[in-house]
């Protein structure tokens, strides 16, 4: 109780608290460095629109550059249970080095490989269980055999293959003379990458779960990945519906939501600080953060969850400002509920929270932070006779609406047919999800505990492939060191401003950051650095807060220092660009970027 009273007192009025713009630094309302609007809304000026759109365009170009191929094998051959044999005749004896199979939506397919001996007239088995493990990408099976006839026997029932490519020992593609007997297997040979398979050609990391499940949702198939609610995978399926089951199609919606986060954080920072320079700095830092960039280019659900979390905190802040202004206006007689301009942001906050929870359970963590912020604000502004009506309004938009959206996310689930109603199905799925996460016992080389995330102690290598003889294509999950390491200090500074100065704006940002970070400290299961991403977005707002204090305290010298820092952050992003983008580069470059012992950015 004493702790709660202390936190509540922090949000009481004090000389240095309140949601207000930084002090006026100039009379020019359109100056990039000095602009301070006179209204509480932080409305966009022409300079704001130019800065926001420019940064959004820059990030869009960065994200869509080499996002993935717009083509992939799609005609499917099924090795039926009653006829699982695929027999290839190469016309003469030749050294076959390997075969590459492009799997459909079935993972971990096994094949028995054999060669026909014309002398003994018998098949000689040389690999009794070769495995093709990953869906919607090329899987190489080693052969290394001099033969004319190659036999592949699918060991699982009704195995589906989109394409098969045979390679000689020298790496040249060779077409069997009987390819016409298997037209679906040999009609898209030109889609096989000559210089090596990379992220451009198929799935990487958790795309084998989320991209695959999005495909299954689109086609009404049983869903493979059931460890998270399904809104994120439904969104991924929209890109597949428009562009096909290709790397580009899988990643399209992730790219769109990653791009939308740029104007959203700009609007948020502008609303917070009423200053164009601070808003531009926040968006700039997000554009050049490596983690945001990578998650915007992979078909997983984390970018969607982070977007909705940022959106719900934005609407909560809008509500607090509108409600504060409403209750300070003594000329307005209070009704049963506050006016529309107050309630709409609050309702949209609840809807956004529902969308985040329907994407990933981390939305619940963020929702707890919202509840604390709302409770402290309500106690401070005591709505009086409106309290009961406001309570029912919040029950509708923060309990009922999220529950409905969460339940609807399970519509694509075609299993659990024994349950007649959607709520029953959602409840059963939720039970299974909880049991999975609660009982997960696993190890992973790139896993890391929560205390390592801010310092980027263990990046996650999501893809690493040879390109030709001298280059590699690598995709790593990591933050921009210039941003994340500086962000630690900024978060501590904001926390200091909350405790010592009782700054309510610092309190809002501290709660938003900690609500998504602290719960992970209690999670015993396997965790990875990308779990920190929603907190890192709030960290960037803490950095923008710190920038607002710097330019207030040091004026021109402060702004020059911040511009210099932003330049360093952009340069650091370019330095690490090859190892987070998948762009082919010389391996030595990645080895030189190993600044910390556990940084394995290339193999």
Image: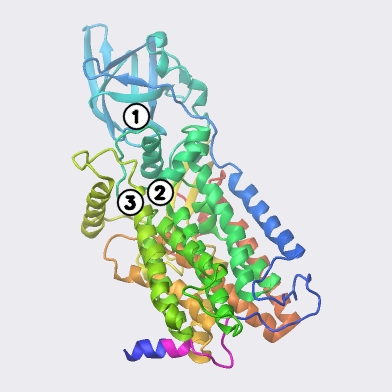
Q: What residue lies at 36% left-to-right and 24% top-to-bottom?
A: 161
Q: Name the residue under label 2.
A: 231
Around disc 1, counting alpha carbons within 10 Å, would you say few (fewer than 14), some (14 to 19), or many (20 or more)?
some
Percent of width and height locating residue 39:
69, 76
Around disc 3, counting alpha carbons within 10 Å, would you say few (fewer than 14), some (14 to 19), or many (20 or more)?
many
Q: Name the residue under label 3.
A: 407
Position of 54 with respect to 137 (left or right) is: right
Residue 581 visible in the shown view: no
| Secondary structure type for disc 1 | strand
Closer to the chain start, of discs 2 and 3, is 2
State yes or no: residue 167 in magenta.
no
Closer to the chain start, of discs 1 and 2, is 1
State yes or no: residue 10 in magenta.
yes
Tags 2 and 3 in contact by the CB under 8 Å rule? no
Position of 409 with respect to 153 (left or right) is: right
Tags 1 and 2 in contact by the CB under 8 Å rule? no
How far apart are the alpha carbons under marks 1 and 3? 42 Å
Nearest-to-viewer mark from 2 and 3? 3
Q: What residue lies at 24% left-to-right and 6% top-to-bottom?
A: 119
Q: Residue furthest bottom?
A: 15
Percent of width and height locating residue 248:
53, 38
Nearest-to-viewer mark from 1 and 3? 3
Q: Give the range drawn in magenta.
A: 8-19
Q: Which residue lies furthest to the left in this view?
A: 418
| Secondary structure type for disc 2 | helix
């Amino acid at each position: 109780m004493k702790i709660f009273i202390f936190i509540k007192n922090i949000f009481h009025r004090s000389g240095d608290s309140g949601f207000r713009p930084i002090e006026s630094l100039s009379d020019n309302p359109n100056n990039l460095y000095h602009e301070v609007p006179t209204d509480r809304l932080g409305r966009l000026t022409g300079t704001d629109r130019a800065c926001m759109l420019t940064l959004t365009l820059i990030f869009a170009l960065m994200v869509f550059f080499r996002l993935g191929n717009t083509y992939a094998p799609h005609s499917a051959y099924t090795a039926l249970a009653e006829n699982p044999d695929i027999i290839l005749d190469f016309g003469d004896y030749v050294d076959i080095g390997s075969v590459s199979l492009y799997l459909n939506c079935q993972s971990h397919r096994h094949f028995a490989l054999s060669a026909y001996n014309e002398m003994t007239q018998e098949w000689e088995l040389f690999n009794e269980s070769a495995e093709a493990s990953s869906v919607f990408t090329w899987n190489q099976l080693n052969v290394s055999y001099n033969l004319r006839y190659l036999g592949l026997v699918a060991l699982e029932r009704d195995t589906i293959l989109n394409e098969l490519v045979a390679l000689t020992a020298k790496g040249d593609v060779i077409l069997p003379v009987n390819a016409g007997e298997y037209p679906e297997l040999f009609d898209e040979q030109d889609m096989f990458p000559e210089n090596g398979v990379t992220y451009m050609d198929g799935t990487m990391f958790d795309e084998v779960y989320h991209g695959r499940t999005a495909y299954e949702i689109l086609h009404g198939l049983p869903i493979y990945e059931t460890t998270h609610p399904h809104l994120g995978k439904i969104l991924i399926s929209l890109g597949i519906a428009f562009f096909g089951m290709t790397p580009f199609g899988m990643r399209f919606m992730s790219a769109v939501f990653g791009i939308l986060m740029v104007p959203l954080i700009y609007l948020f920072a502008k609303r917070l600080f009423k200053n164009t320079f601070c808003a531009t700095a926040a968006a700039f830092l997000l554009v050049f953060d490596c983690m945001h960039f990578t998650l915007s280019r992979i078909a997983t659900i984390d970018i969607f969850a982070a977007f909705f979390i940022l959106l719900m905190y934005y609407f909560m802040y809008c509500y607090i400002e509108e409600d504060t202004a409403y209750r300070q206006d003594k000329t307005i007689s209070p009704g049963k509920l506050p006016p529309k301009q107050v309630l709409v942001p609050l309702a949209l906050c609840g809807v956004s929270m529902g969308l985040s929870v329907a994407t990933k359970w981390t939305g619940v963590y963020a929702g707890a932070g919202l509840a604390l912020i709302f409770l402290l604000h309500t106690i401070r502004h005591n709505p009086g006779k409106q309290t009961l009506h406001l309570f029912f309004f919040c029950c509708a938009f923060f309990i009922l609406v999220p529950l409905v959206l969460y339940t609807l996310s399970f519509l694509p689930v075609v299993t659990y047919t024994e349950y007649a109603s959607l709520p029953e199905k959602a409840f059963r799925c939720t039970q299974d999800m909880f049991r999975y996460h609660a009982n997960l016992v696993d190890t992973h080389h790139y896993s890391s505990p929560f205390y390592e995330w801010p310092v980027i102690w263990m990046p996650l290598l999501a893809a690493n492939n040879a390109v030709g003889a001298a280059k590699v294509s690598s995709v790593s999950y990591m933050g921009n060191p210039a941003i994340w390491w500086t962000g630690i200090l900024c978060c501590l500074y904001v926390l200091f401003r909350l405790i010592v100065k009782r700054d309510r704006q610092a309190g809002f940002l501290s709660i938003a950051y900690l609500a998504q970070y602290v719960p992970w400290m209690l999670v015993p299961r396997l965790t990875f650095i990308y779990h920190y991403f929603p907190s890192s977005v709030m960290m960037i707002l803490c950095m923008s807060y710190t920038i607002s204090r710097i330019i207030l305290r040091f004026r021109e010298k402060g702004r020059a220092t911040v511009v210099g820092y932003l330049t360093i952050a952009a340069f650091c992003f370019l330095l690490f660009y090859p190892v987070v983008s998948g762009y082919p580069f010389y391996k030595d470059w990645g080895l030189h970027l190993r600044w910390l012992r556990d940084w394995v950015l290339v193999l």
